[in-house]
Image (spheres, rainbow, N blue to C red):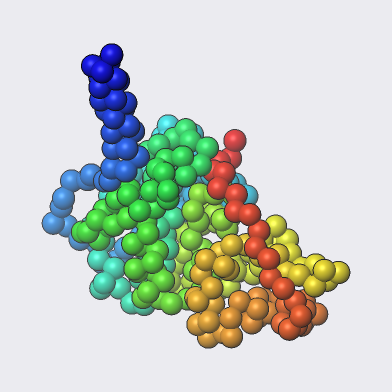
């Protein structure tokens, strides 16, 4: 009897070990090293991919997974680019595009899936998948937090970075470019804030219902602003701006829908 219990316990531990290793292992996107570098970087291939696979902010992952050649060529270019040699706006556009592209890469590598949270437990999609960019290996979290948020310090970036989920900002079907990045960031920020599914004003209850992006990154909205309300007011009509700035208005945060932003 004791032997059966021991064998059963060992078998259970073995099964749990396999499950643990699957969910917690680090996955790296391996690509061949090359000495060639790209200083004058072009996002044209990724722009074509977006135009062919993104409609109303949703992505046709199945179509892209079936024909990834153009996308893979762009990812190859990311590995040998030299963003450190680019000017500020060119770097900023580079890292936003790279993040969005690698999010898509992470999804199609594990597609079909209903959510990025199904790929790895406890947010592992963002912390344990690794990708090659500019001669180094990064997780998505490292690109977002250690590079984009730390080096560019612009809260509007939160509305350009798309985490492949329905509550994220919708994915644009064109890339960010250095010469237009200011206008593009303002446009996606305005689109997000004026979308009642992301920001909703309830005058009767004196409440503002907000995306949790404003809760998770609250400190980011103090850069050049007096907090979230002041940031929102900058993108709202005068009457709405006055409302969100009222001292008696309470902020409530909406549930975050992590369902994949799949076109189907």
Task: Please indicate whether residue 154 sits to the left or right of residue 32 in the image.
Answer: right
Residue at horizontal 28%, vertical 42%? 25
Q: Residue furthest front?
A: 1
**Which quarter of the picture shows residue 80?**
bottom left
Q: Tell me what residue is drawn at x 54 percent, y 73 percent.
A: 218
Q: Quadrant of the C terminus?
A: top right
**On screen, 113 above or below 191?**
above
Q: Quadrant of the N terminus?
A: top left
Where is 55 relative to 194, above or below?
above
Q: Nearer the viewer, residue 43 or 217?
A: 217
The percent position of residue 154, horizontal first and vertical second, equals 47, 76
Task: State the image coordinates of residue 108 (x, y, percent, origin top left).
Answer: 42, 39
Q: Is residue 214 left or right of residue 197?
A: left
Q: Percent x, y for residue 203? A: 83, 71
Residue 43, visible in the rendered structure: no
Q: Does residue 62 sit above or below 9 in this rendering?
A: below
Q: Residue at x 44, y 55 (%)?
A: 100
Query: Could one spot residue 99 in this view of the protein?
Result: yes
Report the front residue among 2 and 76: 2
Front-lying residue, 14 or 145? 14
> Residue 141, how many percent across, how many down?
37, 59
Q: Residue furthest left?
A: 35
Q: Quadrant of residue 221?
A: bottom right
Question: Would residue 72 appear left or right of 208 to someone viewing this image?
Answer: left
Between 176 and 230, the one nearer to me in the picture: 230
Apparent side of residue 208 relative to residue 60 in the rendered image (left or right): right
Number of numbered tags placed on the structure image: 0
Q: Residue at x 47, y 64 (%)?
A: 176
Answer above or below: position of 222 versus 14. Answer: below
């Amino acid at each position: 009897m004791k032997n059966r219990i021991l064998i059963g316990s060992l078998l259970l531990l073995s099964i749990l070990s396999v499950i643990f290793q699957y969910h917690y292992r680090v996955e790296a996107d391996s690509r061949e090293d090359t000495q060639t570098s790209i200083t004058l970087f072009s996002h044209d291939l990724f722009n074509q991919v977006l135009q062919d696979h993104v409609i109303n902010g949703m992505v046709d992952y199945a179509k892209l997974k079936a024909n990834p050649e153009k996308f893979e060529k762009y990812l190859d270019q990311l590995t040998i680019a030299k963003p450190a040699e680019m000017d500020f706006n060119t770097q900023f556009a580079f890292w936003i595009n790279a993040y969005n592209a690698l999010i898509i890469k992470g999804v199609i590598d594990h597609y079909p899936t209903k959510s990025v949270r199904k790929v790895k437990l406890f947010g592992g999609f963002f912390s344990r998948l690794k990708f090659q960019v500019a001669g180094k290996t990064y997780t998505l979290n490292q690109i977002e937090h250690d590079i984009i948020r730390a080096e560019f310090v612009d809260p509007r970036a939160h509305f350009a970075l798309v985490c492949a989920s329905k509550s994220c900002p919708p994915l644009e079907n064109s890339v960010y470019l250095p010469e237009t990045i200011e206008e593009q960031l303002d446009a996606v920020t305005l689109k997000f804030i004026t979308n009642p599914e992301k920001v909703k004003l309830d005058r009767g209850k004196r409440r503002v219902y907000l995306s949790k992006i404003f809760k998770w990154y609250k400190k980011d909205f103090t850069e050049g602003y007096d907090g979230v309300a002041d940031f929102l007011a900058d993108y709202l009509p005068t009457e709405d701006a006055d409302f969100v700035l009222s001292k008696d208005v309470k902020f409530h945060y909406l549930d975050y829908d992590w369902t994949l932003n799949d076109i189907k």
